[in-house]
Amino acid sequence: MSQRTVDRRGADLFADEGRDGFLMRAFMRGAGFSSEHVRRRPVIGICTSWSELNPCNADLRRLSEAVKRGVLAAGGLPLEFPTISLAEPFVRPTTLYLRNLMAMDVEEMISASPIDAVVLLGGCDKTVPAQLMGSISAGKPAIMLTAGPRPTARRQGRPLTIDDIWPLADQRRQGRLDDDEWADLEARLNCGVGTCNVLGTAITMAMVAETLGMALPGSSLPPSGGAQRAALAEATGARAVELAGEGVVPADHVTPETLENAFRLVCAVSGSTNAVIHLEALAGRVGRRLGVEAMREWSATTPVLADVRPAGRHLLEDLQDAGGVPAVLAELAPLVYLGARSGTGRPWAEVTRTVSRSPGPALRTLDDPVFPAGGLALLRGSLAPRGAVLKRSAAHPALWRHRGRAVVFDGLADLNARIDDPALDVDRDSVLVLRGVGPVGGPGMPEVGELPIPRKLLDQGVHDMVRISDARMSGTGGGTVVLHVAPEAAAGGPLGLVRDGDLIELDAEQGRLDLLVDAAELAARAPATPPEHPARGYAALFRRHVLQSDEGCDFDFLRAAAESGTR
Ligand code: FES
């Protein structure tokens, strides 16, 4: 299954009696490691995305020390190395633009280094899929530990989580939050290190890694900075030493069954829409696809069980109290493959049998779900021939079926210039369309799909409208927001043909997204002009090789050849 053959183990290289081993030990001696210490121990790389440019991952330095304790106690030799780190708030144009570069960095460092297994330390949104993608392609045993969520802040006697920023930002636009209140909010919003403290992309992907068996059971939700996470780090280090001797590689964790498990888990917790893209990218690394039709069927048969922010009402710590991923999988037992391997190496069936779980308001049961099924709507139609995504569980039910006139924005500059213009021809039934912000057009699909409600409608009390784009949305966002329209406008998709006033029909129940303009009229319209081809560097590589969202936005040359008989 692994795509590379490791001809000599790291431990053997350090024990080599020839010149190579001598030199390796001599260089380690220079760093203060005795020959006895480095000989014949399984070498465990610790691939860290710690960076001061990434506050979400700030706890990884402490966790790395705890991983080392676990590795040493289990008889291994821990050696830490850095890679690129991607912080959502800081990286321009978008972190997805650099996800594949980070995945290449991870893959090549794991492949090139004398290590027998690796612990992946990730956290902020794209660092997790990048590490998973890179380690799958590198083909050495790997286990992940994520940074964990930030503690929940409080404001005016109530919990304050990162998703609160969207309605508060609207209040600020309306002049209902003054400078002092805005500054107070800035000081309070993040009261510690760690990833976003709702079921956004980072936590969703941490739960995906756990479900795939690439992280220890129960490791996604304990908060960053705490004792529980440090103990998990020790256990992860010890598990990496075991993995070095087991020969199980990450690709073995990415099967049709585990991909379905992971997708159903995302549906059951109402996780981030970004997970759809990352799951396709992971599948592509082993020559598989999930595919719109399969995801549509899985979503239609998976109830939403977690009532957790941003789509729900409760906090991540409430979901952790209810038992976290093992409890969700236990509840989903009739729908998932519990024979799949967990991060301990034992099947999920064993883990879920012994999990302490307490269904309650944050985690409901199959008999009493938050939402019956179809929380994540996979759409197709004349406006999205290769698919689009709507988080139905976070959309206003009155808009699940909607027909309205398009109001079109060509890119972010156009949107920002006109959205609050009092003269904008828009009403509450309009459909806002943003294009030119897909994988190629963005580039990198910025998280701008949750278009702001035009100020004049906001002032009338409108808080949700149908919005459609080839962009993504922050996992902390919500609303009737249709995302990932494929093909994107810049790749010749019909989104590029829409004009102001065209009728668009969304039917989330039937999974349809249609442009109600006849074919002859569309054929007469000029397609969108693609952006100029960059002349050099990563921008040129990205433009030439990035795939559309339905293929995970990976680079075409990084995917494995399709496996026969797979989706
Ligand atoms: Fe880093 Fe949300 S911005 S996890």
Image: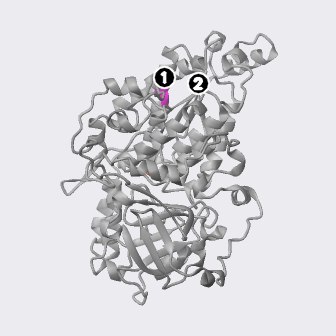
| The image quarter in which residue 360 lies | top left
Q: Position of residue 438 (x, y in %)?
A: 58, 64
**In the rendered view, does 263 fall on the left or right side of 38?**
left
Up the image or down, 111 lies above or below 548; here it is above
Q: For the C terminus, which image quadrant?
A: top right
Identify which amino acid the numbered label 2 is placed on: Val
SS state under label 2? loop
Question: What's the CA distance linking mark 1 and mark 2?
Answer: 9 Å
Q: Which residue lies at the image location 67% right of the left edge and 56% below the top edge?
A: 546
- Identity of the residue furthest to the bottom in this view: 423
Task: Write the start and end of the magenta stretch as one range.
Answer: 64-68
**In the rendered view, does 457 fall on the left or right side of 543?**
left
- Callout 1 touching callout 2 (CB < 8 Å): yes
Q: Position of residue 3 (x, y in %)?
A: 69, 33
Query: Mark 2 or mark 1, which is nearer the start of the sequence?
Result: 2
Q: Which mark is residue 345?
A: 1
Q: Residue 248 carries which label?
A: 2
Identify which amino acid the numbered label 1 is placed on: Gly
